[in-house]
Amino acid sequence: MADTTFLERMLAHKREEVERQRAKISLDKLRQQIEQAPPARPFAAALRHPNRLGLIAEIKKQSPAKGLLAADFDPLRLARIYTENGADAISVLTDLRFFGGSLQHLKAIRAAQGTPGQTAKAPPLLRKDFLVDTYQVWESRMYGADALLIIVAAVSEGMVATLLQASVEAGMEALVEVHTPDELRIALDAGATLIGINNRNLHTFDVDMRTTDRVLAALPPGARHTMVSLSGLSDAQGLKRLRGLGADAILVGEAIVTASDPAAKVRELSGTQEPGGL
């Protein structure tokens, strides 16, 4: 039997995880709890700026490729640093087995954003995980996400559209991740308007920054979408080039959580010079 890729192992795990969660709390109960939740905040709009790239700063403890990234990992502390130093949005990895994340991290960060002094400038939250079932869409909303990630490579073409529609019904936006021009076509056909270009191949974990170039070049003429470059970004040197190619925003995790001064790294990548600037 051929070795399975990381993505295949992850998706098998996620299907089992969804069934376990569904047994704990039904979809009907999820929907009932969501009715009491505050409305989701605009996500794509928070990323668009006339003179710079938007920054989604990621809360990430570890990765399958590099292991532990932050020994003193504190998601609430990181969220506070991101908020105070110019992040336009915050991505929260919620997978436990492979990334050390948790839906509880998402819930706690959203709760902290409601405390005095935080609400007005609190960046919207993205749940970053591997979605394989519409159950996870409603789950994301219940735990405080304003937006969620849909990975085209992880589901069928029809499921991309199904997850997008469920996101709309749940009142959230979806960042649809692609890696190739063919996947871009699937995302566009499904109606995606917020698109992430992952420079990392999820089967091999190889990173190729030219992936963003190739996918942006495949956008139809005149297309109006919010385009986000993901993975492999570590400093401000490549940001001008990305903007010239037509990117609107970047998502960065590893380079921030491993930095000796995460606050300074967020300011560097967001283009914010002074602490507290948004």
Image (spheres, rainbow, N blue to C red):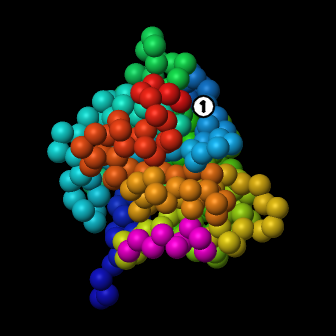
Give percent across and percent down for residue 259: 28, 46
Residue 255 in the figure: left or right of residue 229: left
Looking at this view, is 119 or 52 the one in front?
52
Q: Give the residue at x 49% y 60%.
A: 238
Looking at this view, is 119 or 55 the one in front?
55
Q: Give the residue at x 53% y 37%.
A: 88
| Residue at numbered disc 1 | 40
Looking at this view, is 39 or 62 the one in front?
62
Location of residue 178 (image quadrant)? bottom right
Quadrant of the rendering where the N terminus is positioned: bottom left
* Above or below for 89 versus 249: above
* Above or below for 146 versus 245: above
User: What residue occupies the far bottom of the structure in this picture?
Assistant: 1
Disc 1 crowd, CA 10 A, few/some/many (<14, 14-19, 20+): some
Residue 257 in the figure: left or right of residue 125: left
Task: For residue 79, say whether it is visible.
Answer: no
The magenta stretch is: 206-214
Give percent across and percent down for residue 51: 64, 43
Residue 230 in the figure: left or right of residue 50: left
Give percent across and percent down for residue 16: 37, 58
Q: Give the residue at x 57% y 60%.
A: 242
Residue 246 in the figure: left or right of residue 36: right
Give, as a three-letter code, the residue at label 1. Ala
Location of residue 205 (image quadrant)? bottom left
Q: Give the residue at x 37% y 43%.
A: 265
* Above or below for 73 versus 13: above
